[in-house]
Amino acid sequence: MTPLEILQLQADILIEKGANQIIRSFQKLDINLSGWEGFNTWDEICVQVQGDDSLDWNLYEDSMDRFAHSFFEKLSYPEKMTIWYNTIEGELCAEDPDCEPGYNAIECQDLLKRRLMHKAMEWCNSRIRLYLESR
């Protein structure tokens, strides 16, 4: 395994850990704007990502940003750099001998948010399935 592959693997582990923590946080929240009983906030996000966008989507997106920011801020500097080297900006810096490395928190949080969106697109349970089938 090359050093770059090790960095990529470690970053993927950190991003997955962050996404799972954020999902658990959303699952503990009962805030949903669909009005469906039994939905938690993560169910609502999944429904919206899978095709039922609402006018209130920006509220959920802002919450994702805040959770991603909170997770990222708790990481150590080496963990932040590991994730950053897996952003486009970080990869370009790794290839440029004159680049002064330093993570970009927004880029790193966007990686985490993209993972959340991917998970929301694939997430399914009986509540989500019932809601999507009833539309």
Image (tube, rainbow, N blue to C red):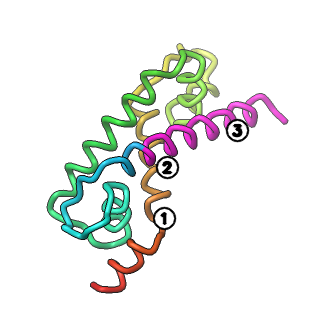
Task: Name the element at disc 2.
Answer: helix
Residue 24 spot, x, y in % from top left = 45, 46
Question: Which segment did they paint magenta?
Answer: 1-24
Q: Residue furthest front?
A: 38
Q: Mark 3 sits on what residue?
A: 9
**Residues at circles 3 and 1 in contact by the CB criterion of under 8 Å:** no
Residue under the point 38% across and 70% down: 50
Q: Determine if the magenta segment contains residue 6.
A: yes
Q: Mark 2 sits on what residue?
A: 115
Task: Name the element at disc 3.
Answer: helix
- Residue 105 quadrant: top left
**Mark nearer the N terminus (3 vs 1):** 3
Residue under the point 32% across and 78% down: 131
Closest to the camera, between mark 1 and mark 2, is 1
Closest to the camera, between mark 3 and mark 1, is 1
Residue 49 spot, x, y in % from top left = 35, 64
Label 1: how many residues lie within 10 Å, few (<14), some (14-19) or many (20+)? some
Q: Is 121 drawn above or below residue 100 in the view shown? A: below
**Mark nearer the N terminus (1 vs 2):** 2
Label 2: how many residues lie within 10 Å, few (<14), some (14-19) or many (20+)? some
**Mark nearer the N terminus (2 vs 3):** 3
Circle 3: residue type? Leu
Q: Mark 1 sits on what residue?
A: 123
Circle 2: residue type? Arg
Task: Name the element at disc 1.
Answer: loop
Residue under the point 52% across and 36% down: 87
Residue 114 spot, x, y in % from top left = 45, 49
- Residue 86 quadrant: top right
Q: CA distance from mark 3 to mark 1?
A: 23 Å
Residue 20 spot, x, y in % from top left = 51, 45
Describe residue 16's horizontal placement relative to residue 45 as left or right. right
Label 3: how many residues lie within 10 Å, few (<14), some (14-19) or many (20+)? some
